[in-house]
Image: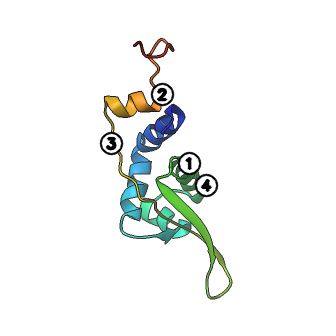
Amino acid sequence: MTSEELLALLAALGHAQRLRVIAELAGGRMYVSELARRLGVSRPLLYMHLERLETAGLVAGRLELSPDGKALKYYELAPFDVRLNADTILAALGGEQPDGKGTST
């Protein structure tokens, strides 16, 4: 994981509404309109949160056609296991120290 990927993950998890999205999707995949109703948010706002979660690799979206031909965007949780410690951060930084210099030997 790069430092950019780590920051995207932390930013995605650092918002109460996005945590609620994850909690809802833990029960199974659902389409955007249903998810928006359950969360009590507008679809445009939900799409913004879903985009952040998808960029971080926490959810995956897929467009599907319903039996009546209507296009529905479904989202589901992507498999993830978040572990954060000093080693995770050092690996993300590629061994760089906070001052931008490499590790000393």
Residue under pointer 2:
94
Q: Quadrant of residue 71?
A: bottom right
What residue is shown at x 39% (from left), y 50% (from top)? 19
Quadrant where the C terminus sits is: top left
The type of colouring in the image is rainbow
Q: CA distance from mark 4 to mark 1?
A: 17 Å
Q: Nearer the viewer, residue 4 or 72?
A: 4
- Pick whichever, 11 or 6, lies toward us: 6
| Residue type, numbered disc 4 | Pro
Secondary element under disc 1, as helix, strand or loop, is helix
Is 20 placed left or right of 35 in the picture? left
- Give how far apart the Cα atoms at labels 1 and 2 are: 21 Å
Q: Amino acid at mark 1?
A: Thr
Residue 2 in the image, given as x and y percentages of width and height: 51, 35
Q: Residue at x 41, y 12 (%)?
A: 104
Sequence-wise, the earlier of marks 1 and 2 is 1
Q: Are marks 2 and 4 in contact (CB under 8 Å)?
A: no
Q: Are marks 1 and 3 in contact (CB under 8 Å)?
A: no
Crowding at dot 1, Cα within 10 Å, few <14 / some 14-19 / many 20+, comes out as some
Q: Which secondary structure, mark 3?
A: loop
What residue did someone put label 3 on? 83
On the image, numbered disc 1 is attached to which residue? 55
Q: Where is residue 34 shown, x and y percent of the image?
A: 49, 70
Q: Which residue is mark 4?
A: 44
First reached walking from the N terminus: tag 1 or tag 3: 1
Q: What's the CA distance linking mark 3 and mark 2?
A: 17 Å
Q: Is 63 left or right of 95, judged from the image as shown?
A: right
- Of residues 43 and 53, the one nearer the viewer is 53
Q: Residues within 10 Å of mark 3 (few under 14, many from 20)?
A: few
